[in-house]
Image (cartoon, grey):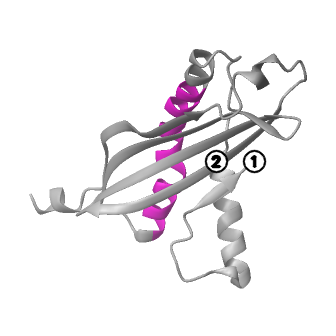
Amino acid sequence: MADADTTPVFQIQRIYLKDLSLEQPNSPQILLEQQQPQVDINLGLSAEGVGDGLYEVCVTATVTTKVAERTLFLVEAKQAGIFEIRNLPQDQVQGVLSVVCPQMLYPYLRAIVSDVCTRAGFPPILLTEVNFQAMYEAQQAQAAKGNGNGGSGLITSAA
């Protein structure tokens, strides 16, 4: 039975919406504008230990839509999950937290952002697919160049 103690474990404990906000600071006047809005999308990724072998991973999307430098609407959503990860080498844990977990959370985040935009009276914003593996590899390459800051380096952004 000693083998059971060293068996690698990866399980989803819970997936949940951690934070959601919608702002329309210039409505109703800006809703009468006929110009095509400019959309800016930023993604963030974070992970932290929350217990023995338990990690919370959060993927955040911030969507800012402007018309003539005035904000039409801003949506920020943070999709999170608690994952149990045990008996993996530390370098593999980092990969799971940076690639596997965000890939599981991202479809939920995409659906939430699209739904909130629609419910706010706007066309849905469809977040494009994200290659978390490529983001992680780029981050690792950057760290290998000596740009490491001594931290976990797990915070990532993409436009």
Q: Amino acid at mark 2?
A: Leu
Q: Nearer the viewer, residue 24 or 141?
A: 24
Q: Residue at x 71, y 62 (%)?
A: 138
Q: Is residue 127 above or below residue 159?
A: above
Residue 124 picture location, percent across and down: 67, 19
Marks 2 & 1, CB-CB < 8 Å contact: yes
Q: CA distance from mark 2 to mark 1?
A: 7 Å
Q: From what the image shows, is residue 57 above or below residue 71?
A: below
Outermost front residue: 29
Task: Please name the amino acid that badge 1 sits on.
Answer: Ala
Residue on which disc 2 sits: 43
Q: Is residue 97 magenta?
A: yes
Q: Residue 46, percent across and down?
A: 50, 57
Q: Secondary structure at mark 2?
A: strand
* Disc 1: which residue: 159
State which tag comes first along the sequence, 2 or 1.
2
- In the rendered image, residue 104, in percent from the top left (x then y), is placed at 48, 38
Q: Is residue 59 left or right of residue 5?
A: right
Quarter of the image where one finds residue 110: top right
Q: Which residues are magenta?
A: 91-113
Describe residue 46's horizontal placement relative to residue 86 as left or right: right
Q: Front-most of 100 and 78?
A: 78
**Main secondary structure along the magenta-highlighted residues:** helix
Q: Which mark is residue 18?
A: none
Is residue 153 visible in the rendered image? The answer is: yes
Q: Nearer the viewer, residue 18 or 11?
A: 18
Where residue 129 sits in the image (x, y, percent)?
68, 34
- Picture residue at 69% right of the left edge, 18% below the top: 122
Residue 43 in the magenta stretch? The answer is: no
Instruction: Count neighbours of disc 1 (C-alpha within 10 A) and say few if under 14, some if 14 to 19, many if 20 or more.
Output: few
